[in-house]
Amino acid sequence: SALHDALIHNQTDVVRAILHAASFHNTELNFVNAQNNANLTPLHISVLKNQIEATALLLQSGANPGLVDANGNSPIHLAAMDKHLIDCLQLLLNTSSWKPAHALKLNMRNYAGLTPLHIAVNAMNVKSVELLLAKGADVNCHETKRGRSALHIAVKKQSEEMVTLLLSCVCITVLYHVLKLHGLLFYTFISLYSCNNFMALFFFSI
């Protein structure tokens, strides 16, 4: 569509003009959620291109942050992939159309079985993880292919900062039993211990 093309070519002024013209003529703005052959909406493209102003304009015009592309990624998944897209992620999570019930969308898995939180942790995007958790992303949600939670991914990355952040959001007793149930407690302990011995005492004391 013309909107897709304008975004691809970084023409924010054209995007603004299209949306303004449609609004001025009381035209239905369903086209803001139109998907191309790759199932990308204009919002997907604005996020991928890190077009902050265009992203804000689209959201104000009713763009849906929950629609998915051909890989099952919503704009939120895409924004979680790169720390440089933090401003777009913040817009997506703070849009006026966001409701508490939409927290379910934060835990929506793409076709690779990953939630936005899994993606942000894997990309070591601390600020993105903080934003997602603040909006209700489930820290205990497991990805479908290997059954890993965000914590397991953080441990694998040997990131003390990320592990500490994730642990601050869960009940430690519940976490312990979840890890034990899945036979991952010993693996987690050894992995944490090998990462400069951080957190080893914590698991031992449990």
Image: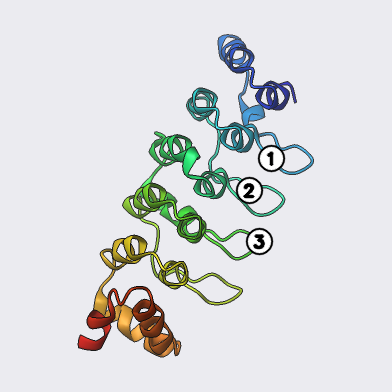
Location of residue 11 with respect to 128 vertically, above or below = above
Left or right, 34 with reference to 205: right
> Are there few (<14), some (14-19), or many (20+) residues within 10 Å of tag 2?
many
Q: Earlier in the sequence, mark 3 or mark 2?
A: 2
- Using the rendered view, name the quadrant where residue 180 is placed: bottom left
Q: Give the residue type at disc 2.
A: Val
Q: Position of residue 93 (x, y in %)?
A: 41, 42
Give the residue displayed 60% in from the left and 45% down from the top.
67
Measured as percent of width and height from the top left, residue 152 is found at 44, 73
1 or 2: tag closer to the N-terminus: 1
Q: Please report contact status of discs 1 and 3: CB closer than 8 Å, yes or no.
A: no
Nearer the observer, 21 or 87: 87
Q: Which mark is residue 111?
A: 3
Residue 206 seen in this snapshot: no
SS of the residue under disc 3: loop
Residue hosting label 1: 40
Q: Which mark is residue 68?
A: 2
Confirm whether residue 14 shows in the render. Answer: yes
- Label 2 near label 3: C-beta < 8 Å? no
**Position of 65 relative to 156 (above/below):** above
